[in-house]
Amino acid sequence: MSVKKLTPVLYVDQIEPCMAFWVERLGFRKTVEVPEGDRLGFVILKDGDVEIMYQSLASAHKDSSAAAAEIDGGRTFLYVEVDRLEGVMAAMKGANVVLPERTTFYGAREFGVKDPAGHVIVFAEMTGAAAPGSL
């Protein structure tokens, strides 16, 4: 067995503000949307081979109330490796910063924000190898 792809599904009260976060700030495009009344119930956003999905909690409860009970109120932490952190930081101007820029012992420059639903997203540029034996 080998894993071919891993796509996070983030559960939110409202998809639209989160979709704008990825599309307007980071250049993702919407590839799939599923309406839920006058709002979206589900969306897939994609940039190249990178994909993220959002589903509304209302939609999740309709799919499976037992499964939805497990995710209600939960938040996610995403760690996203990027080529250049400067571009991301510029795109995130005005976003809710929860991790100011820093350089880690493992050789990453990192910067973290919350999306409109409260999920923490840390962007990292790998600047070099960590010192031997430091991990």
Image (tube, rainbow, N blue to C red):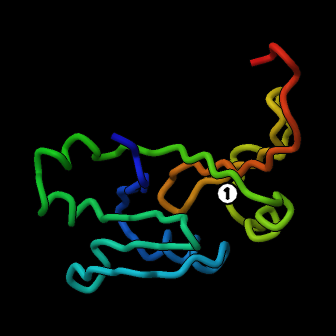
Q: Is residue 39 left or right of residue 91?
A: left
**Along the viewing direction, whichever of 113 and 125 lies nearer the viewer:** 125
Query: Residue 56 location in percent, x, y?
Result: 30, 65
Q: Which residue has dot 1 on it? A: 96
Furthest residue in direction bottom, as rendered: 38
> Which amino acid, by three-letter code, is at mark 1?
Asn
Vertical arrangement, residue 71 with respect to residue 24, above or below: above
Query: Residue 2 location in percent, x, y?
Result: 39, 43
**Along the viewing direction, whichever of 80 and 36 lies nearer the viewer:** 80
Q: Is residue 62 left or right of residue 34?
A: left
Residue located at (31% from left, 78% from top): 40
Is the N terminus in the top left, top right, bottom left or bottom right quadrant? top left
Residue located at (85% from left, 18% from top): 132
Is the C terminus in the top left, top right, bottom left or bottom right quadrant? top right
Residue located at (38% from left, 64% from top): 54
**Splitting the image into 4 quarters, where does residue 73 fall?**
top left
Residue located at (73% from left, 66% from top): 92
Q: Secondary structure at mark 1?
A: strand
Vertical arrangement, residue 74 with respect to residue 19, above or below: above
Query: Residue 13 location in percent, x, y?
Result: 35, 63
